[in-house]
Amino acid sequence: MRKPVRMLLFAGGAAVLVYLVSRIGVRVVVDMLRRVGWWFPIVTALYGVHIAVRALALWATLKHLPCAALSYADVLRVRLSGEAVEMLTFTGPFLAEPAKGWLLAGCGVTGADAFGAVAIEYLLYTLVSSWMAAVALSVLLVRGVLPQAMRTPIVAVIAGLIAFTLGCIVAAVLEVGLIERIVRALGQVIGRERTERVSVRIAPVEKVLVGFMHAQPGGLFQVLTIEAAGHALLAMEIWIVIQALALPARPSDPFVVEGGVKFISAAFFFIPGQIGASESVYAFLFNLLGLTAAAGLTMALVRRVRALIIAGAGLGVLALFKP
């Protein structure tokens, strides 16, 4: 995406954020942030642990591949560096995930295994995300809190998430790469030469991915369990902020919110940093659950700041990174 377009989208998102703050009230938002107070360092620390848990998932993946052995400390450095790239470039996973593969390759892991391990970790993280999202959206449907116009699209999203899971199961059981086949099928649309170049790059990475899922069921379960623990930490962040704001929430609400916001980065990938979009979704979900839009906006701002703090630490790691 060209820089002027990205700047225009960023400005649009920032305008939405300013509108939200003005609509809710600056004093209200500032008061809620003040009430979070000393809970904020705990939320930041929890996010740091979440990053460490995702590094553990990547390390566990690498241990099941025939590649150079890396220490957990090395993998954690890669993960923190990737976090810095993701947050500070406003490109999300589109640049951060390849950057992790490049850093792993610099540590001595072969190219296919390096990028394959990153792909495995990201896929399994996304798979657990899709399960949480499907459950959260189903809960919102059952509770009847969604606007009528949104019910059919939400059902379609849940069906898509189920189809995604089934696709992963098919790929794992049959050990067949679906991504490369889909890319090749698009040859008539985006050009055969281009799809051929992309397919050649995807094929060895996808081979590592489907080979892991097919031949390493124990490793697959282990990494899925680690990813689930990482997602639980994110839900705990929401619970802490809800408690700090003394909101009358159900025990399931933090998980519903976390599941509901899972695909913000994917749905709004074209907005740098998802600025404005992220805050809007949090405000919407909190309001649906009776927790007020102001609390949702506060939650989004708390998460944005704590992510920037961890990304800053990751930037320091990246600056000192010597594979």
Image (cartoon, rainbow, N blue to C red):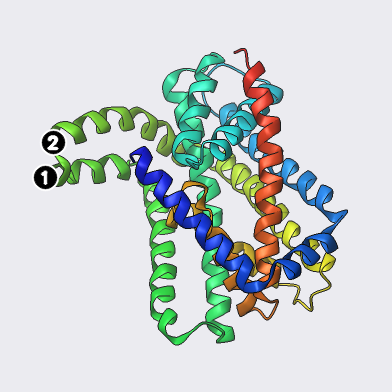
Image marks 2 and 1: residues in contact by CB distance under 8 Å: yes
Question: Residue 77 location in percent, x, y?
Answer: 66, 25
Relative image position of residue 309 (x, y in whole percent): 71, 40
Residue at horizontal 43 percent and vertical 62 percent from the top: 161
Q: Amino acid at mark 2?
A: Arg
User: In this orientation, which residue lies closer to the viewer: 196 or 225?
Assistant: 196
Judged from the image, the secondary structure of the residue bearing numbered disc 1 is helix
Residues 157 and 57: in front is 157
Residue found 37% across the figure and 32% down from its top: 207
- Who is closer to the viewer here, 154 or 319? 319
| Residue 260 can be seen, yes or no | no
> Callout 2: helix, strand or loop?
helix
Q: Is residue 118 above or below residue 170?
A: above
Q: Residue at x 68, y 76 (%)?
A: 292
Q: Can see residue 316? A: yes
Query: What residue sits right under mark 2 in the picture?
Result: 192
Q: Residue at x 68, y 53 (%)?
A: 303
Give the quadrant of residue 321. Answer: top right
Q: Residue furthest right?
A: 38
Residue type at numbered disc 1: Gln
Q: CA distance from mark 2 to mark 1?
A: 6 Å
Left or right of 275 in this view: 160: left
How busy is the neighbourhood of tag 1: few (under 14 within 10 Å), some, or many (20 plus)? Answer: few
Q: Which quadrant of the figure contains the C terminus?
A: top right
Question: Which residue was labeled with disc 1?
Answer: 188
Q: Is residue 31 left or right of residue 16?
A: right
Find residue 129 and report its horizontal and vertical position in percent. 55, 56
Q: Count every numbered label the image shows and give the total.
A: 2
Q: Position of residue 106 (x, y in %)?
A: 52, 15
- Quarter of the image with the N terminus is top left
